[in-house]
Image: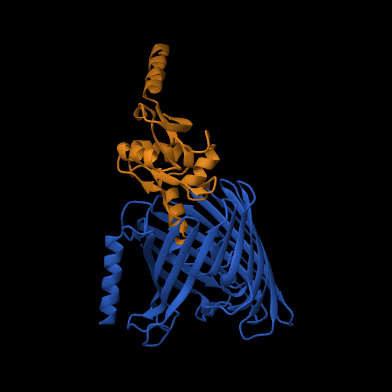
Chain colours: A orange, B blue
Amino acid sequence: MKISLVIFLLLQLLNAREIVIIADKNFPKTHLSEKEIKAFFLDKVHFVNGKRVLVMNRKYGEPVRMCFEKLMLHKNKSALERYWRKAYYQGKRPPKVVESTQMLFAYLKNITPSIGYTDKVELLSHKVKVLYRAECL
Amino acid sequence: MAKKILFILFVITTILLSQDEIDYGLNIPNTPFTIGGYLDMSYDEKREAPVLFDDIALLFFGRFDSFELLGEVEVSNVSLEGKSNRSSDIDLNLERLQLLYAINDTDKIQIGRFNSDIGFWNQTPIAMLQETTSNPHLSQYMYPKATTGMIYFKRLSDTDSMSITMQNNSDIGQEDESIIADMHMAFSYHLDYEFFSWVFNSGLYQEHHLETKSYYTGMAVKYEEDTFMIQAEFFTQQSNEIKDRPYSMYVQTLWRLDEKQDIVIRVESYKDNVLDIKEENCLLGYLYRPWHNVVIKSEYIYHSNASLSRVVSSISVLF
């Protein structure tokens, strides 16, 4: 029984997805708090050092996005829909949706300041700043 | 003919724009502009024309560096015969036209015509974004719904913020049943936590064509979690004449049955010496969202003035 439990927990750990909140290599900060990340992705904060930040989201339904929304925004699907309905009327806009990981890194390479998020395993040798790490089970 | 066109427009918009996403509006390619809008159609059994398109509105947005432009133009109270406000001419009303300049991340200035920064109801005063089809008394009679002037926003910390409103000129919107002000000075303080938030408001205004100056003070509180929400607002208004509005308040609770269905109860009480009424009412409503951008609502209002007890229903689309 105990062995099964240990094996189960180990498997869970192996399956744990680590997401990283990343920015372009010239991003003026080395770390963002959870509250700051939430504020950027809910369009409540727009600037860093006086420059408008390009905020990028992943495609709807992608596991990495579901993990990000649950972990960092603390909102489920209907809560986010409720939030964005009102926010849209008030002039707020959701983050830009990138179609692929390649596109995310292309924007990060060419636009500063810009932030997004991805699965840790996709980081590879891309030159970006890691601002925050979080783990989804 | 107009009836058919309106119905076809409504049905097409409802179906075609029900995308499963959090994004709305249509971005005009290679520009910073987005256009969108909303439609509200309601049924009120006690109204002269029971079925009306309350609002057919166009929204437009633009963002360029530190500036944000937002406009809202609407046609209201369009009957199935195609008449707007009982006239055969279509009356376009400028609801909002605001230009915001972000000085930095904590300070912003906005000019133009905008929804007054008061309470919770007035931040999203359209049927699509409210839990009920009918509006509480205070949303119409206790403060100017819109301001044509300037507002300064200051974010004081992660949780609290304030704003100062200044208007000393005529309103550029069309006159309607709400308070239209020629002067409006106001202060607002917001506190927002993860689940709980509250707003304090105080202001002074002078109504269009009147010498009377009125002061209002109020507070709004809200607690919201995934399956439950409770919201309450209380306002009092005094003027330099004898008649005033001692109080107007409501408490509204909402239960989310599942992702698509909600039940809402609202209890309301107000004393209005200008209209010479002191009334209470209780509302029981049901909401159904077949898609994320469509809401169908129906409610029964039990009113202390029996002639106002009635059923009200609506369908709204945001696009």
Q: Nearer the viewer, residue A98 or B213?
A: A98
The C terminus of chain B sits in image quarter: bottom left
Name the quadrant containing residue B190: bottom right
> Looking at the image, is A43 positioned above or below residue B35?
above
Identify the residue at the far top of this view: A3
Q: Is residue B315 left or right of residue B251?
A: left
Q: Position of residue B69 (x, y in %)?
A: 46, 64
The residue depicted at 56 percent of the width and 64 percent of the height is B110
Q: Position of residue B167 (x, y in %)?
A: 62, 73
Q: Is residue B89 left or right of residue B220?
A: left
The residue depicted at 64 percent of the width and 69 percent of the height is B166
The residue depicted at 61 percent of the width and 78 percent of the height is B169
Q: Position of residue B19 (x, y in %)?
A: 31, 55
The residue depicted at 50 percent of the width and 67 percent of the height is B98
Q: Is residue B6 left or right of residue B250?
A: left
Q: Is residue B318 visible?
A: no
> Looking at the image, is B58 positioned above or below residue A29?
below
Name the quadrant containing residue B219: bottom right
Q: Is residue B76 visible?
A: yes
> Looking at the image, is B175 positioned above or below residue A72?
below
Q: Position of residue B20 (x, y in %)?
A: 32, 52
Total numbered labels placed on residues in the image: 0
The N terminus of chain B sits in image quarter: bottom left
Q: Nearer the viewer, residue B10 or A60?
A: A60
> Looking at the image, is B139 positioned above or below residue A2?
below
